[in-house]
Image: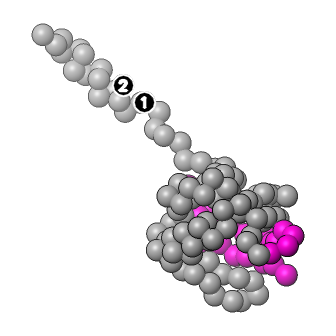
Amino acid sequence: MMRPLSLLLVPALLATAPSPKRLSPAATVQKQIEMFNAHDLEGFLALFAEDIEVSELPGTSAPTGKARLRDLYAERFKANPDLHASAEAQMVSGTFVIQKEKIKGRAGKKGALEAVVIYQVKEGKIVKMWGLRE
């Protein structure tokens, strides 16, 4: 038999239970690097919004939408089994994370690719990403 007081307390306790926390913008970007390095396509894609916008700076449009990102990175991970990224420097301003990144292990390429990537993160998802490289 349940006591009437218990019936009142259970909903109150559930309402005050901590909700899962969203990752900060910096932590979201770090987690995406970790998933990239693990070649965990689903874990990687889970950190992006469905309508992710990707651009190269200055002003070149690149893949848009998670479906296009899936195709692109599935192919990259398969063709480059040693692909690995690292963040060399980072600056955070609100929802923006700016990183200098180094990407190694590109099949048929000598040396690392260095790029600056600007991420905009909202509600734990990367919604926009701009790349700047030589």
Name which residue lies at 59% across and 67% down.
Answer: 78
Q: Identify the secondary structure beneath mark 2.
A: helix
Q: Identify the secondary structure beneath mark 1.
A: loop
Q: Nearer the viewer, residue 39 or 69?
A: 39
Q: Main secondary structure of the magenta part?
A: strand
Residues drawn in magenta: 109-134
Q: From the image, which quarter does the N terminus lie in? A: top left
Q: How many marks?
A: 2
Given the image, on which type of amino acid does mark 1 rest? Answer: Ala
Quarter of the view holding residue 94:
bottom right
- Badge 2, how many Cα within 10 Å: few under 14, some, many 20+? few
**Image location (x, y in percent) of residue 111:** 87, 70
Given the image, on which type of amino acid does mark 2 rest? Answer: Leu
Q: Nearer the viewer, residue 2 or 88?
A: 88
Name which residue lies at 71% across and 82% down.
Answer: 56
- In this view, the residue farthest toward the front is 108
When the figure is inspected, residue 69 is found, relative to residue 86, above or below; the finding is below
When the figure is inspected, residue 17 is found, relative to residue 7, above or below; the finding is below
Name which residue lies at 73% across and 72% down.
Answer: 107
| Label number found at residue 13 | 2
Query: CB of mark 1 within 8 Å of CB of mark 2?
Result: yes
| Label number found at residue 109 | none
| Mark 1 lies on residue | 17
Q: Is residue 85 magenta?
A: no
**Image location (x, y in percent) of residue 129:** 65, 72
